[in-house]
Amino acid sequence: MYLTQHTDYGLRVLIYTAINDDALVNISTIADTYGISKSHLMKVVTALVKGGFLSSVRGKGGGLRLAMTADKINIGAVIRHLEPMQLVECMGNRNGCLITPSCRLAGILGGAIKSFFNHLDGFTLEDLLNKPTYDLLCFPKIDIMPEQEMAETMPEKVERVLEKMTPSDIRIDAVN
């Protein structure tokens, strides 16, 4: 079993958007970052907006943001929304298989899919975010912010990043 490219890209868009959650993101930037087709990404984003995972802001200065916090976006729900999960013909609407009335394959595969989603339902988008991914995908925004406001909000942002770090995220490079 494998996930389609559509679903793969959908998960990548959500990860990118979650990591850059302090500003609106746009499709062009996401496509350039991952090196994938902008037109294909537009279809993926449309599906994510329709599914209620992303919000779209139109017009000048518009873009995309998560429709809810990352801890509320369930990975199983995202994949159910994006992925057809029709492993064999008899699991779909166009079933022309002769042995369907006596075949047990659909039931067995259906059980496997149920187990697959039971596992995925235990994870949220927040579980996919870590320091190395943050370092690769976070593009700092240049905000003109009063010094007092920066002093008040910066510790909170740093704390959020540090909370997501695990010991394996820390790398020390020797400098000669």
Image (spheres, rainbow, N blue to C red):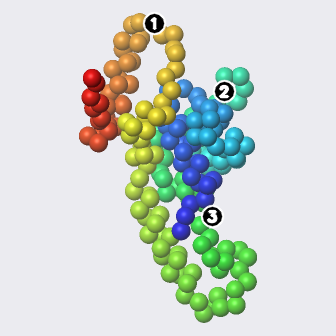
Question: Vertically, is 60 above or below 28?
Answer: above
Query: Around disc 3, counting alpha carbons within 10 Å, would you say few (fewer than 14), some (14 to 19), or many (20 or more)?
Result: few
Q: CA distance from mark 1 to mark 3?
A: 49 Å
Q: Locate residue 148: give its quadrant.
A: top left
Which element is circle 2 on?
loop
Note whether residue 71 is visible.
no
- Residue 166 position by quadrant: top left
Of residues 64 and 166, the one nearer the viewer is 166
Q: Looking at the image, which residue is at 56% across and 60% down?
A: 3
Sequence-first tag of 1 and 3: 3
Q: Is residue 70 above or below residue 112?
A: above
Q: Which residue is mark 3?
A: 84
Name which residue type carries label 3.
Pro
Q: Which mark is residue 146?
A: 1
Q: Is residue 113 above or below residue 153?
A: below
Q: Position of residue 1 (x, y in %)?
A: 53, 68
Q: How far from the left and from the top, in percent, is residue 15?
A: 50, 41
Instruction: Name above or below for residue 19 compared with residue 143.
Output: below
Residue drawn at (48%, 53%) of the image: 75
Q: Which residue is mark 2?
A: 62
Q: Earlier in the sequence, mark 2 or mark 3?
A: 2
- Mark 1 / mark 2, whichever is N-terminal: 2
Near-viewer residue (171 or 82): 171
- Horizontally, is 31 left or right of 17 in the view? right
The foreground one among 176 and 47 is: 176
Q: Secondary structure at mark 1?
A: loop
- Would residue 176 be visible to someone looking at this image? yes
Name the amino acid type tagged 2: Gly
